[in-house]
Image: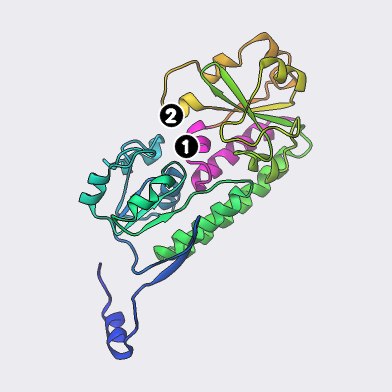
Amino acid sequence: MKRTLAAVTALTLFAAPALAETTIETATGPVTISETPATTAVLDMASLDMLDALGIEGVTATSNTYLERLAPYAGDLGTLFEPDYEALNALSPDLIVAGGRSTEAVPQLEKLAPTVDMTMWGDDLLDQTRARLAAFGALYGKEAEAAALTESLDAEIAATQAAVEGKGNALILMTNGGKVSAYGAGGRFGWIHTEIGLPEVIEGLEDTSHGESVSFEFIRETNPDWILVLDRVAAIGGEGESAEATLDNPLVAETTAAQKGQIVYLNAGDIYVAGGGITSVLNTLEIIQTAFGASS
């Protein structure tokens, strides 16, 4: 990496220990990176989403990014679950960004290059989004861009809060072929309830990564005003019954959500694969705003 003349002079005169040294917050605590990375290998789609939004160059990702807008970053670094260590060694990146599905590989990745675990998980997801944006902004000298994106996030949250206010309760469902799981405020997508003030149709759903398995009878009995849907099969490019086909049955048709045309299909790739990424979150908020804003 290049060093500026002024910085080199300062190093000579005052014997400073490092240049462009930055300490950032990660999922495992503060990590100090000695220089701004010129080449970055990314094994986490939410992080890739943020680096893309910040306009970071020199980024290479896994062989499949699952999101069309992130496809230009696809490389030969393996999969989210199984990094290709030989390819990473050949790339010799200045930094490896892991997280989520690749977090268990971090000990092995650290043997190849400086590695940060930027996993986001839990009921304070959007606070983690803000924190990761700030960290990446500081690391790559994009503090102003990160701050602007955070301002956009806060503004869109406020607009979405206004759009859903007084419009009833909701149930978040994930379909997987013919199977259906439900998520509550304490679950993986709970920020949709807690951050924008959208009431749950029922409290106490299991807080597991793949949600609480539910029946169509459950959906009818809880009778949500709104159903928010993400299609896991579509998110991962798999084969199987679509969400629309799964929910097209007489029991779901009896719900208020179905009868009022208030079943909202979210962008599954954004929320399932790159959940917490800034563009992912903004896209999801826009879909919800549009759907709820159109109802009276």
Of 258 and 139, nearer the camera is: 139
Residue topped by disc 2: 236
- Horizontal relation, residue 267 to residue 38: left or right: right
Residue 252 falls in image quadrant: top right
In the rendered image, residue 294 lying in the magenta stretch gets the answer yes
Question: Dot 1: few (<14), some (14–19), or many (≥20) neighbours within 10 Å?
Answer: many
Residue 241 at x, y percent in the picture: 50, 15
The residue segment tinted magenta is 267-296
Residue type (three-letter) at the residue carrying disc 2: Ile
Q: Is residue 280 left or right of residue 20?
A: right
Q: Nearer the viewer, residue 136 or 148?
A: 136
Majority secondary structure in the magenta region? helix
Residue position marked by numbered label 1 in the rendering: 273
Measuring 61% from the left and 13% from the top, which residue is drawn there? 248
Figure quadrant of the C terminus: top right
Q: Please give the name of the residue rendered at 39% of the width and 38% of the height, measured from the top-left corner.
A: 81
| Place of residue 175 in the rendered image (x, y in percent of width and height, measured from the top left) | 56, 23
As drawn, 123 above or below 14: above
